[in-house]
Image (spheres, rainbow, N blue to C red):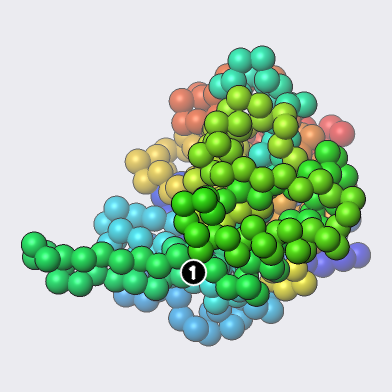
Amino acid sequence: MSKHRVAVFAGDGIGPAVTAEAMKVLDAVAALHSFEVECKEYPHGSEHYLETGELVPDEVFDEIRGFDAIYLGAIGDPRCEVGLVERAVIAGIRFKLDLFVNLRPIRLLSEKFCPLKGKGPDDIDFVVVRENTEDAYAGIGGILKKGTPWEVAVQSMVYTRHGVERVVRFAYQLCRKRNKKKRLMLVDKANAIRAQEIWTRVFKEVGEEFPDIEQDHSYVDAACMWMVKNPESFDTVVTTNLFGDIITDLGAVLQGGMGVAASGNIHPGKVSMFESIHGSAPKYKGLNKACPIAAIVAVQMMLDHLGEESAAARIEASVASVLNRDSVTSVDASSGIATDEWGAMIVEEMRSR
């Protein structure tokens, strides 16, 4: 029997509530597929910071490197400085563990939640590979003479050959593994941001190793247009950190909204982190209203990464079945379905398969 060790950061706001339902689903599917999961919870988030003044100490990062996966609920609290805890927890894990791939499946599970007329699950099924450790997020920059008429704010976009090449190669490999249209699209803005020409060159050079993969290219503004107009033309996308952050939120809307979208922060062969992409929604804290589907899909992605493909497929099929029920008309806090009721429905559906 296989066993997986998972570090869990439930986080803030609705984070603990949706994480509880995700762990409920994880326990149930583990029993159904005969593997074990050992979870260790970490308190680090906004509440912990407000109580102790501590963000995430180095020893915690050292410890979680030894786990098989990391699961994150949601981070953020308006009582804290904007971005302070997010940078410490989310960015801290991404950068200190060198999780250089942000993997975002854009997959529609129920046609009724798609805002595009005439588009269904067969039309919206692609994946975005976002570089996760460079670009404007590298933190090179600052503000000079703040608060004066001479104030200057600078933030540098940084791209290294090493960083670009490894994420581009990952994207080619993923495109081959998906074995669908076998088309990889590079999304950049190299015509205006000349530093991104490194992406154009590396994309072409690495592509010579993958003659079975069709190379495609789009500037980011055009890509956003085509995602809305012809989402069925997309297969696998690779892009920069900043543009990936933007276009995957657009992708989330195509698949039904933030309430159903999840992501993986990956370093192949090393511990990786999985999370829903929505925020902590503090106004819904403790109300048992938040939809935990995204949190549950994050568990699905985690299990797929850990080699439990059949368990991951069972979760996805069960989520799709629940979302397609006539009684389910919304995937946000207005659905009328309680957070724990969502979890119970998914578990029931899994056990019936």
- Please state if 188 lies on the left or on the right of 170 as rendered: left
Residue 59 is situated, as x and y percent measured from the top left of the image, at 53, 85
Quarter of the figure that contains the C terminus = top right
Residue at the (47%, 31%) spot, across then down: 333
- The type of residue carrying mark 1 is Val
Residue 167 visible in the displayed image: no
Q: Is residue 119 left or right of residue 222?
A: right
Q: Is residue 281 visible?
A: yes
Q: Is residue 92 above or below residue 181?
A: below
253 or 109: which is nearer to us?
253
Give the residue displayed 62% in from the left and 43% down from the top: 218
The residue carrying pointer 1 sits among few (fewer than 14), some (14 to 19) or many (20 or more) residues within 10 Å by Cα, namely some
Q: Residue at x 89, y 50 (%)?
A: 212
Above or below for 61 versus 99: below
Image coordinates for residue 173, horizontal then vertical, percent: 81, 58
Q: Position of residue 341 (x, y in %)?
A: 60, 33
Residue identified by numbered label 1? 158
